[in-house]
Amino acid sequence: LQQQHYLPEDRLQTLLSDLVGATIATATLTGFSEDVYAQLADFEQETLSQVKVAKVKHLDETGFRIGSKTQWLHVASTDRLTYYHTSPKRKALLKGLTHTVVHDHWKAYYQLKDVSHSLCNQHHLRELKAVIEYDKEAWANKMQRFLRFAHRYRQGYSLQPIPQDKLRRLLAYYDEMIEIGLRYHAELPPFA
């Protein structure tokens, strides 16, 4: 309850008291967490090892508070595994990653060596939504629809590769949308 569902200690104490009549000290709850953490050390290292060498891994980070100080929760995940680590520094990136990393285009990720980069479509869709709503750029609406279509199309092939002729058509349309967006921006008057 505390780790999986982020239930604070005081609420967990109340819940255990209400459900089973147990009065549990904060130090006992802390001890439980420390015991489980120690028991999972080998599992944590094995998870990290597998994530590092996975063909595709997703990276993200988010700020949160620990003891009233801003910390960073870094996540590296595959389709089966997730590795978390915290740091007081946002740029505390994992070392020793191989193959492909999917991320949100945060500049620091490009400092990772020995990996290929792939950008997260969900982040693209979010940015396109802002361009559509605030800047009213028609090309962005077409690109957003295309990315959603391409995602559904990819899912239709499950684990099989998309046939080369169809993939070429998808890539050509993608390139066309990018060119339209670039042309649109090239034609805008300069900022005053």
Image (spheres, rainbow, N blue to C red):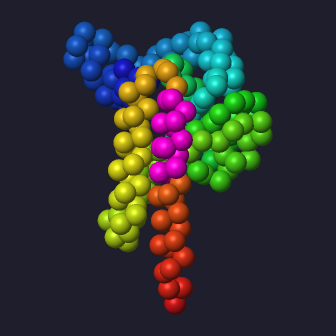
> At which x and y percent is residue 63?
52, 47
In the rendered structure, does residue 173 fall within the stretch colored magenta?
yes
> At which x and y percent is residue 56?
60, 29
Residue plotted at (42% across, 40% down): 150
> At which x and y percent is residue 172?
52, 49
Front residue of 55/160: it is: 160
> At which x and y percent is residue 71?
57, 44
Front residue of 82/133: it is: 133
Q: Which residue is the extreme one toward the front?
A: 165
Visible in this render: residue 135? yes
Residue plotted at (62% across, 18% down): 47
**Start and end of the magenta stretch?**
162-174
Q: Mainly helix, strand or loop, the magenta region? A: helix
Please give left or right for residue 4 compared with residue 43 in the image.
Answer: left
Front residue of 1/103: it is: 103
In the rendered structure, does residue 134 fall within the stretch colored magenta?
no
Q: Quadrant of residue 93?
A: top right
Q: Is residue 188 above or below residue 60?
A: below
Q: Is residue 87 above or below residue 29?
A: below
Visible in this render: residue 26? no
